[in-house]
Image (cartoon, rainbow, N blue to C red):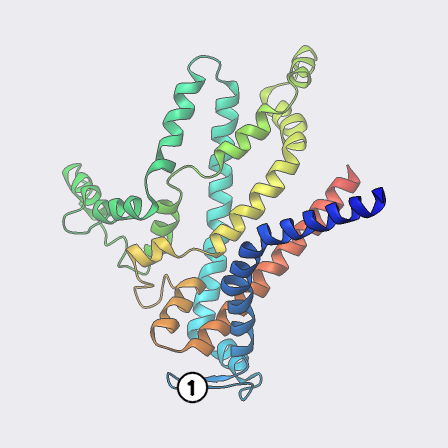
Amino acid sequence: MARRRRWDLERRQARFAVALTAPAGVMLLAFIAYPVVYSFFLTFSHFTIRDVTWFAAGLENYRSVVADPDFLTALWFTLGYTVVWVALSMGLALMIGVLLQQVSVGATFFRGMLFLPTVVPVTMGFLMFQWILDPANGILNYVLKEAGLGGLALNWLSDRSTVFGTLVAVTLWGFGPWILLLAGLLGIPKELYEAARVDGASFGREFVYITLPQLRPTLMVVTTLQVITGLKVFVPIYVLTSGGPANASLSLYFLVFQKINQYKLAYATTVGWVFTVIVTAFAIMTAVAFRVKRDDA
């Protein structure tokens, strides 16, 4: 009798749990699972505004994407931007984190000031840079001209020779993931530094032999997140350049956006899936590298 009562109670609890999770499950199926499956099938199909001919294209869409000069331009820009931006953002964030680690007076004030850029909405921040970099009325060129450096006043976002570096510099605003790195730095036992100083170790040796090895797990995770963020660059290009001039700042995400606006959904979803494969491959390689490093340690 007691067993049957317990079984009835567990069954009611299971039904209650299913009832609670059912709305979330329906939303996941409707807004995530269904679009993912639909877009994957669409990469093998012909799409027009009127109808879809399922599985009629085979691998034609993939061949078209790989052979498309716009895709190759967007791919190389995205990879180049990611490499440069991640290296600079991680270096800047690590430098800020190490400096804040050493601060004992006013640490809260400096951390609060460095946190302020993250409060500004992303689009508003890039619109501010659009005004600053305006070739005719922007404050940057005005200051350069007033300082007698008019030769350096350029069309920062409209010149193929400057748009890449300008986008990288603009998107470094906010100082990168310094908060995450600072959290990792503050988690390093102070006794290690104290013992090193007793032995006469310099700051450089402390950084190489204590800080970097202890910070390795944090660096691996943060670098992975930064690379994924870099590969998905879209907002600064949408706000500042629209992929120009002459596709010099065309990223993969923005290429997908363009093709969707042109109603080339089969092409756009194919680019999206190729991009997904690239990101997934990187994530797997990072996880494997992290596992190997941890096993070696």
| Image quarter (top left, top right, bottom left or bottom right) of the C terminus | top right
* Residue 59 picture location, percent across and down: 57, 83
Q: Is residue 264 left or right of residue 153?
A: right
Q: Compared with residue 62, is residue 249 higher up or lower down, i.e. above or below?
A: above
Secondary structure type for disc 1: loop
Q: Compared with residue 27, is residue 65 higher up or lower down, i.e. above or below?
A: below
Q: Compared with residue 42, is residue 6 higher up or lower down, i.e. above or below?
A: above
Check disc 1 and give the amino acid type: Asp
Q: Is residue 212 left or right of residue 174?
A: right
Return the residue at label 1.
51
* Residue 107 picture location, percent across and down: 45, 18
Q: Residue at x 84, y 42 (%)?
A: 2
Quadrant of residue 114 within the rendered picture: top left
| Image quarter (top left, top right, bottom left or bottom right) of the N terminus | top right
Q: Residue at x 37, y 45 (%)?
A: 169
Question: Among all residues in the image, which is located at the extreme front?
Answer: 1
Question: Among all residues in the image, which is located at the extreme top?
Answer: 198
